Amino acid sequence: MVTQMDASLVEVRGVSKTFDGVVRALDDVSIEARRNEIVGVVGENGAGKSTLMKILVGLYPPDKGELYYRGRRVPFPKNPKEAAKRGISIVYQEKGVISSLKVYQFLLLGHEDKYVKFSRLQIDKMKKHAREILEELHVKCDAEDFMYEPALSTQKMVEIARAILSVRLECGDDDITPIIILDEPTAPLTVEERRELFSDILNMKKNVSFIFVSHIIPEVMEFTDRVHVLRDGKLVAHYDLSEEKITEEDLFRAIVGRESSEYIYKPEVKRVVSEEVVLTVKNLTKNGCYYDISFDLHKGECIGIFGPAGSGKSEIIKTIAGLISFEGGVLIIRGQKVKADELPHVRLGRGIGYFSGETGKELFLNWPIVKNISIVNIEKILRKLIPVISFNAEKKMAEKIVQRMRISAPSVNTDCYSLSGGSKQKVSVGKWFERSPDIFLLEDPTIGIDVGAREDIYETTLEMNKNGTSMILVSDDPKEYSILCDKIMFVKDGRIQKVLSPEKFRKVMAT
Amino acid sequence: MKILGRNKLITPVIIQTLKTHPVILALIALLVIFSGLYPERFLTPLNFKTILRQFVTLTLFALGPSIVVVTGSLDLSYVGIWMLGGILVWLLMPILGMFSILVIPLLGLGTGLLIGVIQVKAKIPSFILTLSLLVTYSGLTATLSGGYPRSVRGYEFITATLIPYLLTAFLWSIPIIIVAVFIMKRTRIGTYLYAIGSNEEGARLAGINVDKYKILAFTLSGLFTGIGSIILYQHLGGSAPVELNLMTVVWPLVAIVLGGTPLIGGSGGPQRTILGALTFTVFYRGLYLSLLHPEMIQLLVGLLLIVSIVVSARGLKGVTIT
Amino acid sequence: MAGLLLYREWFRRNMTTVGAMVFAIAIIAGFQVIIPSFLRYHGIITLVYAMSYFLIAALGLTFVIMMGSFDFSVVSLLKLAALICVLYIDKLGFLVIPLALLISVGFGFINGLLVTKFNVPSFMATLGVSIVVEGTALYLSKGFLHIMYDKTFRALATTFIAGLPSIFYWAMGIWIVSIFIAMCLPFGRRTYAVGGNLIGAGLSGINVARHRIYVFMLSGLLAGLAGVLYMAQLGGGSMEIGADMAIPLFASVVAGGTALTGGVGGPHRTLLGVIIITWIEAGMLMLAIGHDIQMVVFGLIAIGMSIATIDRRRIKIIK
């Protein structure tokens, strides 16, 4: 019988990390990875998952904490190579693949010193070792393929193989059990590719342990043996899925937090939804992302598309925004059928505004607030007689928004770079508020910002709603849906499962 | 089956090579066309000798920068190294005697190092950096030379005929080409440079010291140009020009792109550049023999540059082009 | 307190311009000390002549750099426009001017097309186009020097008003119009937007591809205009025109504070950069400093100012 000590491979205790003396990324977190298992580390964005992983692979030192390797206390690794010596290696979420390299080159990237003779690479030896590990892990590609040739899930497998190989080469031992950190591995994959990837990973469980970092709850539920839940830098829950009966909702609640006392603002306004349909989606399909999506959006209505990450909700809203093209089905905006590959600016011309909480994408950070607000509202600040920008009108508009959104900044001429996250979000929402599009798309509008800013943003969006703007919301925060939406569509695996009213939704979330 | 064998497997290999190196088709096509148009001018030993000479010149200029292009950057300093190096040889001749020719590779090495460090630390786009450096060097050259090309005697042995009918400069350039291709294809450095060109961030995440290797790429480029310039020096008459001619800067670029090294990097390299250089030389020579106006030829060269970039950029969906 | 913060903001944003201004004053003062006649009438006229056409061309380049791209063909287009004027003035009279401008705009359009539809990096595209343009110019001029005899044409640039040649007023007028376009017209905002955040620009409703083509066309137009006026000023032209102008032109845009990363700076700053560059040039000329050392200086300035103005906060990977 294997004792607890034997089974434990890597354990961290009491890890804390603060950045710049202000941002508390991790606060006394302890997790453990054992032999022959897949352990999950889940949490929202900003919960501290990636910081913890970076500490494990030696990219940052922790402020406090202890590391145990196979039961013995060891110092934290100072760089990825040292981490590999301890058996820990990571497969990054994105940008990990170097497509122009051949598979064997990529597999052994960084370890060429073991194949070098008089500065000449022993390519045949490299190819041989590459083929060995590809076969061992049943990876469906050839060592001489270019990395861009195999399917995405196979590429991920090659990345995993590379991580395992790194550990073996650094430790000089083929029998060691590596601990591979998978950072959101399924993000770019289609639904079918995910299945494949997971079955391959499960086959490896005998010899490799995995730390699976994710916020896709169904996957975590299905494939992990134990789960650690991080929220706001703290470890808030630990479930052993083989022993306890945990539902997806349990996990949801642990991730997002049960306390609703944060939200003081209670909407009293009964939303008036007219009969007029502004947007129709019929059988919208994009292979690998979503299938047969159909719904109508009425004027003044706010529809929420809810679901776990990977359900397709993000792709659906991005398609309506014009950032992604769709393959099948019909999209009708204001009675006009639109082309599948229209660019965002054309969609804007049709009255669709898209706002993403990741403000880097749409804000002009090196511009002052005033210019960011006016760029989507140019027509409003032109003078009457000649189409020239009126600086006065521009400034007044910005000041109005800054006041309304309660943005704290020295002046409207402050560069957006220096604003806090919440303020940046407010500038973005503010500019859309001014623009008042017919259809407003919100994706993760309040991600990573404080309670006060959240409130202000909700108030603004509700006001826009009242003024006749129709909205579609996609977010990871269930509370947002119940505050803002008239109707909530639940999607999973790319399909609409059911449509709920806010009351029903709240009930479902509360159980 | 990717094994080369002395049996029917050769044909698939040839087809495979043609598919991945379409420039060979262009080369063959040009040879056929020009031979057909004016065989009496094109198919002469003199012409082939000229082609070889020009090919050597072009290759020696294009080898170095093609290493940098693999990483996704550009290096336009080669002409500057050659020109400034040439004048330095003349200046240092009285002091260092025959050894003064060695100043060119040293200059190349130092220049490459300088460019690499500035590019990496100050994050200036390489094209403007190397272009400005080129202009600076050209100014220095003109100043030091007083405006006249200065030739130096004493290095004729470099290009003295060793094998009859075979250009000695060509013989010297062979080892240089081999070393360049070897570095890119058979060493760790080459693998890392391709990785950086393909996905710089991914290379960093994989633990490669990207800064160090980028600097190395520029340094190698300068070094190869410097060494090549030794041969070029005598090959082109024992001196270097003192005025900057835009064509000498552009032609190697055409050779690189035509050969199949994409400007965003990640693939291609010296072995392809040789093909590009050969094809371009044939192209230019063929046009020259057609007795077209020199302006027309220049125009066609410009068009060729544009067309080859467009064709090689076709795979660039989703990459932000500024 | 807020006032102090604002000052700091303003200073940081305009640091390069302030630095450039200080540098400019230092240069001018320095030259004045060394060459007593520098700022006297004769000297000023030389400076103005050197500066005017240069400024017009630099303004076109400024818009392109604001947008985050690069236009290497400005100098060649200038040359071509100038040659067209001198070659066809006899046959076409003053129609050469719209012809020259049309051709420059046309090449600008081609630049824009190559960059947007064919995904060619702007440096390469404009380099290729400039070779084609040079070839055309060479073909048309046959390498000879051509003299502009038409007095009316020359009067475009050389008529003296209030002691300064008319080309100066052209340049100033275009400068003011450029500032107006950049600051007060939606077109200018869009240019900054595309340079500041390509995706964000699209999301803000800007037709990015179309706008970039417009800007390249504008650059072509200004280059052509500069060429026309240059021919009027100089009275003669051959292939020698503008051979060494590319780097000083670029240096003057960057020296003024318009960064290569795009989204900042603008035509108002370019005047400063042009003054610095052309006055350095003129001063060096008066000091009989070789043209070649000038090249060295300009190369160094180009590198130095690029380093100083690049916004490192935004770009993580620069090739």
Image: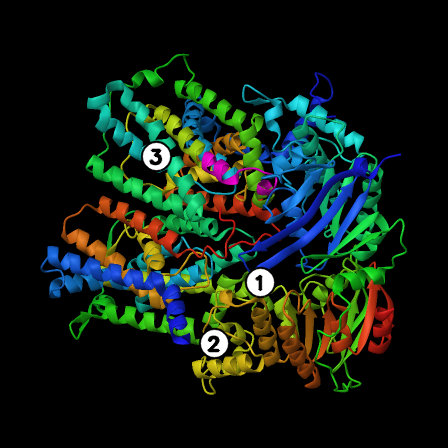
Secondary structure under tag 2 reads: loop
Mark 3 Cα shell of 10 Å, populated few (<14), some (14-19), many (≥20) = many
List the residue tagged with mark 3: B81
In the figure, residue A325 lies in which quadrant? bottom right
Mark 2 Cα shell of 10 Å, populated few (<14), some (14-19), many (≥20) = many
* Image quarter of the N terminus of chain A: top right
Q: Measured from the top left, where is residue B69 in percent x and y?
A: 50, 39
Same chain check for tags 2 and 1: yes
Q: Measured from the top left, where is residue A50 in percent x and y?
A: 66, 51
In the displayed structure, A317 sits above or below A399; it is above
Q: How is the image coloured?
A: rainbow
Secondary structure under tag 1 reads: loop
Same chain check for tags 2 and 3: no
- In the image, the segment drawn in magenta is B203-217
Badge 1: chain ID: A
Residue at 21 percent across and 59 percent down: it is C26
Say which of A87 and C251 sits in front. A87
The residue type indicated by label 3 comes to Ile
Q: Measured from the top left, where is residue A320 in percent x and y?
A: 71, 68
What whole-number distance in Å separates the C-alpha atoms at marks 2 and 3?
51 Å
Say which of B294 and B17 sits in front. B17
The residue type indicated by label 1 comes to Gly
Badge 3: chain ID: B
Same chain check for tags 1 and 3: no
Residue at 61 percent across and 49 percent down: it is A64
| Residue at the top extreme of this rendering | B163
List the residue tagged with mark 1: A360
Is most of the magenta stretch helix, strand or loop? helix
Determine if residue C94 is in view.
yes
Marks 2 and 1: CB-CB under 8 Å?
no
Q: Measured from the top left, where is residue B78 in percent x and y?
A: 38, 36
